[in-house]
Amino acid sequence: MNYNVDDKGYYGEFGGAFIPEMLYPNVENLRQQYLKIMAEPSFKEEFDQLLKDYVGRPSPLYFAKRLSQEYNTKIYLKREDLNHTGAHKVNNTIGQILMAKRLGKSRIIAETGAGQHGVATATVCALMGMECIVYMGEIDIARQAPNVARMKMLGAEVRPALSGSKTLKDATNEAIRDWINNPVDTHYIIGSAIGPHPYPDMVTRFQSVISEEIKWQLKEKEGKENPDYVIACVGGGSNAAGTYYHFLHEEEVGIIAVEAAGKGVDSGESAATSVLGKMGIIHGCKTLLMQTADGQITEPYSISAGLDYPGVGPMHAHLYKTGRAEFIPVTDDQAMQAGMVLSKLEGIIPAIESSHAFAVLDTKKFKPEDVVVINLSGRGDKDLNTYIEYFKL
Amino acid sequence: MNRIHQKLQENKKLLSIYFTAGYPSLNDTAKTIKELEENGVDMIEIGLPFSDPLADGPTIQASSTQALKNGMTTELLFQQLGDIRELVSIPLIIMGYFNPILQFGVEKFCQKCQEVGVDGLILPDLPLDVYQDQYEPILKKYGLVNIFLITPQTSDERILQIDAASDGFIYMVSSASVTGSQEGFGNQQENYFKRIANMNLKNPQIVGFGISNAETFQQATKTAKGAIIGSAFIKHLSKNGTDTIGDFVKGILKN
Ligand SMILES: Cc1ncc(COP(=O)(O)O)c(C=O)c1O
């Protein structure tokens, strides 16, 4: 079984590029160029150097002793929360800004939900002196004020998405419309492993540095490259794709994907796409997505803005369909409690997205000798208000 | 012969009008179509509303949102069109994003189109290669003409590919934009219109996006076979409802 993208841009039956003709020249050009550009020695050199000196990579692989004792198994944390800007998102934006420069683009657009990808994009645009416009749902702008301020300080223009449900999916629609209106000078930096081919594969490759590092770091610490399990939360699927990438074809490594169940999978307020979704087309990609019987895309819910996406990246849809990955839904409450446990036991306050991954420790039993790597995709600073309200701190 | 082919043979410039089914009121569909034909419109695009219309500007987005709020569905559209061929004889084309059609079932959708007398489809997010790989035989089986888009950025090579794959007309998007964002045509469009005219394509071209009045209709049809008005008509409907459709059409065709 192949879990990577095929020549036509599909992962099994998922993926492809379902885009209006207006986007064809840009997406096709990207498709033809992205692998060539990524393989250029000068690109690799610049990418690696920025990841090292600017982002602070490699991110540590940390053995969480007290957490391991608590759950009676060997738990390692991949510390993406220690990256500059506080999450894994910057791995992708560094890669894509270098790509945009080589494609001769001078103007950058992006969508953002919680604001993490928006901040990561505004950051690399400041770094490269490029114009940056970030689309963000009007509702998200109101509930993520600190990240909006960060983007502004970094020189980006934050444009409210006023259509539809005024959240992440609508911000993505607006970014795509902007690209249709500005086909010549603009590159669209998508923030997750979603969108038309080649985006899911390109984003996955930029994020794959996560599993590349896990391999040699684990070798140093455990004397073997492969853990028994890798665990990551899945919104669109970029941190998960990066965490799994070098283990996809290592059958002995169990892959666990954690989805946001919101108030419960059957509550009507959930973002557990693998369970609730059906095959369909969203943002140029054929994948599992939450929709009505009539094919209208519905609005998901999660306490975590970063997991609040009605679709899932096509690679993950394929991992689900083939059974290569185990998908586990985690509710708001389970995630919040897990975030508190990690804070108390390890002195690390996680992003609520990442807290979802840790909640698996409460629902799934691991053996004492199992080596379990959890991707800690981001830090909790941005979520302090939600933690304060939830725990009445 | 398909009504679209027949219409394209008429020796005149064609006016095509787009509206969103279920807008402004849920059951306006048949009335709108009838009024448009009575007032001299040559062809109609019936928009099947979608929650996430990527290629549309604010006007058509808002009409889609309202139509869905009104309760519009794919099933209901076919009910509304059930007797339409007793009322009108001009070509009817459904314009819709692919996901609702995929969920309805592509074959069932095409079969229903044939039953009620729809002549063609415009599916902006169904790309040429996927159409050819998977869906062309189904559309053909039910006598449906598939209409492809080209834009000022489309390469000559791809235009020729699209021309070869088309059997009807080519939908020529006037500028790099979503629907409804253009204010009149400048030099760039004139050059683009000329460039396409000089390619001597086998399919006639009908221009869409940014046509809003008699003047832009005239400009667009200098070289092209016809033009499509969408957002401007939706704006008219949102202000005046369906009672003064005739005034709108006369305003376009006054010369
Ligand atoms: C810290 C963090 N983790 C995870 C996600 C989810 O995105 P993805 O599934 O693409 O990794 C986000 C998105 O904003 C995030 O900020």
Image (spheres, coloured by chain):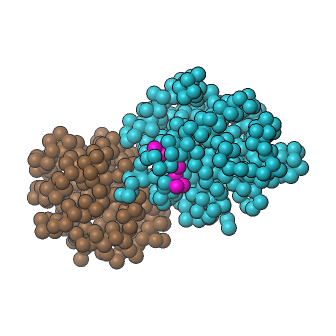
Chain colours: A cyan, B brown
Q: How many marks?
A: 0
Is A337 rendered above or below residue A29?
A: above
Is A106 rendered above or below residue B54?
A: above
**Residue A310 x, y percent position in the rendering:** 48, 48
Q: If the picture is divided into quarters, which one holds ligand 1?
A: top right
Task: State the residue at coordinates (69%, 30%).
Answer: A343
Based on the displayed image, in which of its 4 quarters is residue B10 positioned? bottom left
Task: State the residue at coordinates (48%, 55%).
Answer: A277
Residue A74 left/right relative to B123: right
The C terminus of chain A, quarter of image: top right
From where the camera sits, is residue A381 visible? Answer: yes
The N terminus of chain A, quarter of image: bottom right
Task: State the residue at coordinates (76%, 39%).
Answer: A70
Residue A233 left/right relative to A28: right
Residue A244 left/right relative to B74: right
Is A166 rendered above or below residue A389?
A: below
Q: A349 and A198: which one is in front?
A: A349
Residue A386 left/right relative to B187: right
Is A151 rendered above or below residue B48?
A: above
User: Over which residues does the magenta segment extend?
Assistant: A269-275
Q: B33 and A292: which one is in front?
A: A292
**Residue A274 x, y percent position in the rendering:** 54, 55
**Residue A14 x, y percent position in the rendering:** 55, 61
From where the camera sits, is residue B225 visible? Answer: no
**Residue B184 x, y percent position in the rendering:** 29, 42
Q: A96 and A249: which one is in front?
A: A249
Tell whether position A78 is magenta. no
